[in-house]
């Protein structure tokens, strides 16, 4: 049972209703996470603004989804793991990349370097080693892209924590993490 209120878009306060309408038009659905965020239009607006800004960055959508998978597994967020499995498939990730991405692995060595760096950022709380930074740079990422990786970790950590606190009800197919290790 969810621990945070899920706002009905039809009865939401005007600012929340407008934001939820944007979500509905963009996705065709309004996920429970965003309905819960709508309890504070400031929270929903912050999430939509941050994710919208990152979607205009240089990291491809598929890589952003793989970063989200790594972060969801590291933070044990079943909601985000389920959501980003669906979104990752929509972004063109193969089943193999969806499963291996959960473990910071990828078929593309450059992408794998980004995922390993993601894991380093999470496990060190940002205090990555010089070797971690050198490895992601050697794979071909510049400082702007490295900043986007860090930003994606921060955004996904926020949603992981939000959904864990709220015990957001799944509206995506649950992921059995015992398969495909």
Image: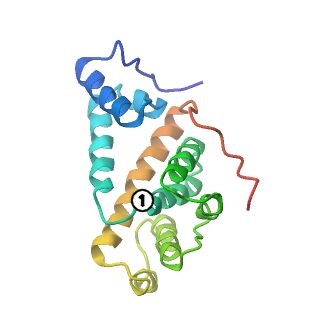
Please name the residue shown 56% across and 41% down the image. 79
Please name the residue shown 45% across and 84% down the image. 135
Q: Which residue is tagged 1?
A: 153
Examine the rendered structure and indicate whether residue 3 appears above or below residue 133: above
Q: Residue furthest right?
A: 179
Residue 175 falls left or right of residue 55: right
Examine the rendered structure and indicate whether residue 107 appears above or below residue 22: below
Examine the rendered structure and indicate whether residue 37 appears above or below residue 118: above
Please name the residue shown 67% across and 45% down the image. 175
Examine the rendered structure and indicate whether residue 13 appears above or below residue 142: above
Q: Nearer the viewer, residue 160 or 51?
A: 51
Residue 74 falls left or right of residue 27: right
Residue 91 falls left or right of residue 37: right
> Residue 113's x, y, as percent?
49, 77
Q: Where is residue 95, by image quadrant?
A: bottom right
Q: Where is residue 181, by image quadrant?
A: bottom right
> Residue 126's x, y, as percent?
40, 68
> Residue 15's x, y, as percent?
23, 24
Please name the residue shown 52% across and 26% down the image. 3
């Amino acid at each position: 049972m969810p621990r945070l209120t899920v706002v009905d878009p039809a009865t939401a306060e005007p600012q929340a209703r407008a934001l939820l309408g944007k979500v509905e038009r963009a996705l065709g659905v309004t996920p429970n996470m965003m309905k819960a965020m709508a309890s504070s239009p400031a929270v929903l607006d912050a999430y939509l603004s941050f994710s919208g800004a990152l979607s205009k960055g240089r990291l491809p959508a598929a890589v952003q989804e793989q970063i989200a998978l790594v972060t969801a597994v590291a933070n044990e967020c079943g909601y985000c793991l389920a959501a980003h499995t669906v979104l990752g498939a929509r972004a063109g990730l193969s089943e193999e990349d969806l499963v291996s991405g959960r473990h910071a692995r990828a078929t593309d060595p450059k992408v794998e370097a980004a995922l390993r760096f993601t894991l380093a950022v999470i496990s060190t709380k940002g205090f990555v080693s010089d070797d971690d930074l050198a490895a992601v740079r050697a794979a071909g990422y510049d400082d702007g892209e490295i900043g986007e990786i860090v930003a994606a970790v921060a955004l996904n950590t926020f949603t992981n924590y939000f959904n864990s606190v709220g015990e957001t009800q799944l509206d995506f197919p649950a992921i059995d993490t015992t398969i495909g290790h």
